[in-house]
Amino acid sequence: MTRPPDLATDVLIVGAGPTGLLLANILGDMGVATLLVEKRMDIVREPRAVSIDDESLRALQSVGLHQQVASLCVRGYGSIYRGPKGNVFATVKPFSKDYGFDKRNAFQQPDFVTLLRGAMARHETVTDLFGTELTAVSQTADQVQATLTHADGTQRQVAARYLVACDGGRSFVRKHLGIKMVGSTFEEPWLILDLKTTSNRCFHTEVFCWPQRSCITLPGPAGIRRYEFKLNRGETVEQAEAPEFARKLLAMVGPDANEPIRRQQVYTFHARMAERWRDGRIFLAGDAAHLTPPFAGQGMNSGLRDAHNLGWKLHEALHATNPEPLLASYEAERAPHAWEMITLAMRMGQVMMPSSALKGALIRAAFHTLKLYPPARDYFAQMKYKPKPRFDAGLIWPDQRPKSLSLVGRMFPQPVVATPEDKRHLLDDLLPDQPVVLLYGNRPETMISPADLAAFHQAGAAVIGITPEGVNPRPDSFAILRDYSRMLSSRPYADHLDHAFLLRRDRYVAAIVGQDRLGDLLEPLSRLRSAIVAKDRDQPKHAQPAA
């Protein structure tokens, strides 16, 4: 006879790193019964990740934590690339805020995860068990059964509707399921030095592209700095972690040779991805699903994207009669983009780590040539080389436009918008946590009939209007805003005047139609929603749009 569970929950999260903690906050914000378990007695206090990007801050905005996280950051830093003589041959200093935030921001991971852990206390439906290890797991068609072992050796049984493994690169869950990590053979040991103080006055990251010793130095908040040095063949971990070794390397690249060292540790970076991200009711996320070299600063950020993508789908799946399309879309959407980030990191590594003096000279010459052609120069300087967050498959309904011009599957930008009273907000702060039919036109109030408006509300969508920058909105039966920051005034968005965008809960564009075909959005909307939902589930949690 099967023993009844000691605990039951909707979602069991394994691992209290950034991915698991953000997912717990997302589910808590949605009222989902969530249990998070972590085998350590506390969060990781080592400053592992040091960079958070604009997409991640937008994910944090969805749970109202973006301002608190931003207060922990050095915001808007860039990168300076130096050759063997210290000369600058390339700079990356992006200034646009496509998604509402600076593209690169420096922070300390312990402060970040402390904030995320504390934020879980806002949610009565979220419980955490630290000092508790998942030691066995199985599943049926209806639920996941897990054995949890506490630090004192006692055990309890948990039944969950779904399990999400956020338990790192050595994931117990992934190994238990027999899921292999596949991909590149990239494997590089680097020495990480975190300083308590710095004499380096450079606001930006410095990248020393030296064949004899590649180095990256990154700014941090409160006057700290990180240095990362590539180890050469034959250098051992014991040698690299000796104090005199660190002092010698620091002296090579700047004024910090005598600054106090907070941490000195060798890490081996990998480029790997799980061959599949799901087994029935069990999902992999974060480092359990993908391992990214650090050169693009995308390892932790990719995990936060996983949480943002999966959280709302689990919420909908709990209410759906047929949750399979929702659940299958997670890997279909996230895996290709995660691999693009791994590929980007490896390509950036080739720039940072030229294997010979000749290759280094050729790379520098190529960048000098780019400066002669402004579009190519800006492509690099404004980080346009970073793959845009977009999906080619999943919960999207493509239009007839060429891929280069289509906005379906892309994350919608986040302009600063103005209400009819000229109060200004980031767009997401005025959108409720539900699908949104966004009417973009000079007079959005004329684009929709009362019958269509009622049909969208009945189907679980909010309707919001947005006008171009030069057109004042007027109050109507639904909120109408003005694109104050002009993001929608350039192509390809300008080509979609008098169109309706169906935005998912994670603010990706699911479908686009002209104003004469609004009814065509009802079918994809029904696929995004599990059912007609209660009013309290769909109310915005952080701000209310002006009516």
Image (cartoon, rainbow, N blue to C red):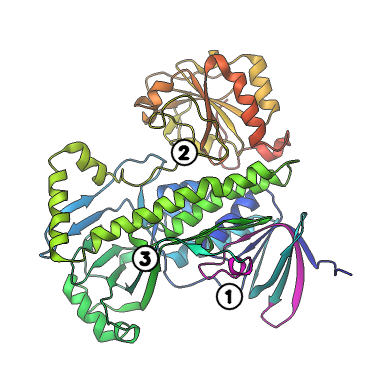
Q: Residues within 10 Å of mark 1 (few under 14, many from 20)?
A: some
Q: Could you say whether the residue bearing mark 1 is in a helix, strand or loop?
A: loop
Please give left or right for residue 164 compared with residue 235 in the image: right
- Looking at the image, tell me whether mark 1 or mark 3 is earlier in sequence order: 1
- For mark 2, what is the residue? 411
**Magenta region:** 150-177
* Identity, as a three-letter code, of the amino acid under mark 1: Arg
Q: Residue at x 59, y 23 (%)?
A: 478
Q: Report the amino acid beneath label 2.
A: Met
* Residue labelled with disc 3: 186
Residue sitting nearer the eye, 158 or 71: 158
Which sits in the foreground, 406 or 118?
Answer: 406
* Residue bearing the label numbered 1: 40
Mark pair 2, 3: CA separation? 30 Å
Q: Is residue 205 visible?
A: no
Q: Nearer the viewer, residue 139 or 450?
A: 139
Q: Crowding at label 2, few (<14), some or many (≥20) Cα neighbours within 10 Å?
A: many
Which image quadrant is residue 434 in? top right
